[in-house]
Image: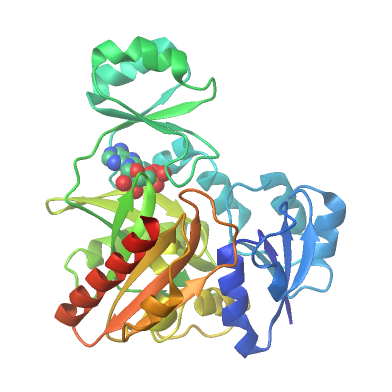
Amino acid sequence: MIVGILGGGQLARMLALAGFPLGLTFRFLDQAADACAFPLGEALVGRFDDPRLLERLAAGAAVVTYEFENISLRGVESLAPRVPLHPAPRALAVKQDRLREKQLFAELGIPTAAFAPVTSEDELRQAAKRLGFPMVLKTRSQGYDGKGQWIIGEEGALGQAWRRLPRVPLLAEQFIGFDREVSIVAVRGASGEEAYYPLAENVHRQGILLTSRSRPADPAATIAQAYAQRLLAHFDYVGVLALELFQVGGRLLANEFAPRVHNTGHWTIEGAETSQFENHLRAILGFPLGATAPVGAVAMVNCLGKLPDPRRLLGIPGVHLHLYGKAVRPRRKVGHVTIRAADEGDLEAKLREVEAVLAACEA
Ligand code: AMP
C-alpha cells in the first residue's frame, strides 16, 4: 500500500519509519530537492499546488496525508475527490488562519487568551486598550516555531511597532504569564474510535520547542482531553491531532492545534506502546488504533542548530537518538533525543546529562 505525504520533512520521515514494519511504502511531495524524507520513498519535487505533481502523488495511493500546514489548501482540496485524504481539509483551512482557529476554540467553549484581529494602526491601538501589555502580535498565516511573532511591551512602543510590522493580517493576543505549557496528542480512527497519549509538559526557547516530558496521570489531562475531543468531533477528524495549551493556575488556555503528528509527541516512539506516527497511519488507513499507554518515564529533547555527538549521547543508558539528515542551520530542528528511565528521579538525572552533552556541542 502506498501512502502519499504532502511535505517531506522530519515528520514525513518518521511516518515512513513507522510505516515500513506495516509493509507500507511512501511517496512524498516537497519543494526542497533535499527534503529529509526523500531517501525513504519516492520523491516528487515541486510546488504543493502543481496539478501534475498532485496527480502523481495520488496515483494508486491508498491514502494521502500531510505533515505541514503551510501548504496550498486548494491543492489539498483538489485531491479529495481522487483519493482518501486525512485529516480533512476543513481542519487545515482553520489551522491556516490563527483568527479562525481562535474563533473556533471560542465556538467550542475552549478558553484562550483574549484576542483581536489587527489590520490597521487604529485596530492595533484598540486591541492594546482591550488586551493590555505586554501584547503578542502574530501573523494570521504562515507563522511557525516563533516566526511571525512579536511582543509589544508598552503603549509608547505601539507607533514604532506598527511601522515595523509586516503589512499582512495580524492577530493580537493577550500575553499569558503561564505556569507551564502542556499539550495533548490525540488520535481518532475512521470509525470514530479515539485514543489520547499522556499529557506532555513542554518547554520552548525563543518560540521553538526544546523539551517535552510525558506526564502520565497529570491532573490537567482530563480537561486537555475534553478540549481535544471537541476538536476531533467538530472536524469528524481522522488521524493524529495535537492541542497546545498554557496552564495558569487550575485553568488551561488553548494556544493552537496542529492537524498532524507533532513535535511534542516524538517521545511516543520509544515511550509509548504505539507511537503517534504508527497511530496516525493506522487511523488514516482505517486500521484499529494501537495502545497509547506510556512505557516508563520518558522525555524528549530537540537538537537545535547543531549536530550532537552521538558517542556521548548513546553512552547514557536509556537514550535514543534520532537524526533527521538535514543540513545544519541556526536554530533548525536537526534531530531529537528520547530518554527513557525507570522512574521520574532517574529520568531527571539522565535529562541533565543529555542537556549537558547538547550544551557542549552548542558551545
Ligand atoms: P505559537 O507560534 O503560537 O505556538 O507560539 C510559540 C510559543 O510562543 C508558545 O509555545 C509560547 O511559549 C509563546 N507564546 C505564544 N503565544 C503566547 C501568548 N499569548 N502569551 C505568552 N506566550 C506566548
Q: Of residues 207 and 90, which is closer to you in this image?
A: 207
State which image quarter holds ligand 1.
top left
* In the rendered image, the vertical position of residue 115 relative to residue 8, given as above or below: above
Question: Which of the image's four quarters has the C terminus?
Answer: bottom left
Q: How many marks?
A: 0
| Quadrant hosting residue 227 | bottom left
| Quadrant hosting residue 67 | bottom right
Question: Which of the image's four quarters has the N terminus?
Answer: bottom right
* In the rendered image, the vertical position of residue 281 relative to residue 79, given as above or below: below
Q: Of residues 125 and 37, which is closer to you in this image?
A: 37
Q: Of residues 154 and 198, which is closer to you in this image?
A: 154
Give the left or right position of residue 215, taking residue 168 as reference: left
Residue 95 lies, in percent from the top left, at 51, 47
Name, please, the residue furthest toward the right.
52
Q: How is the image coloured?
A: rainbow
Asked whether residue 292 is in view, the answer is no
Q: Residue at x 55, y 43 (%)?
A: 96
Q: Residue at x 53, y 37 (%)?
A: 141
Asked whether residue 288 is in view, the answer is yes
Residue 173 lies, in percent from the top left, at 33, 32
Residue 218 lies, in percent from the top left, at 19, 70
Give the left or right position of residue 133, taking residue 302 as reference: left
Residue 136 lies, in percent from the top left, at 33, 31
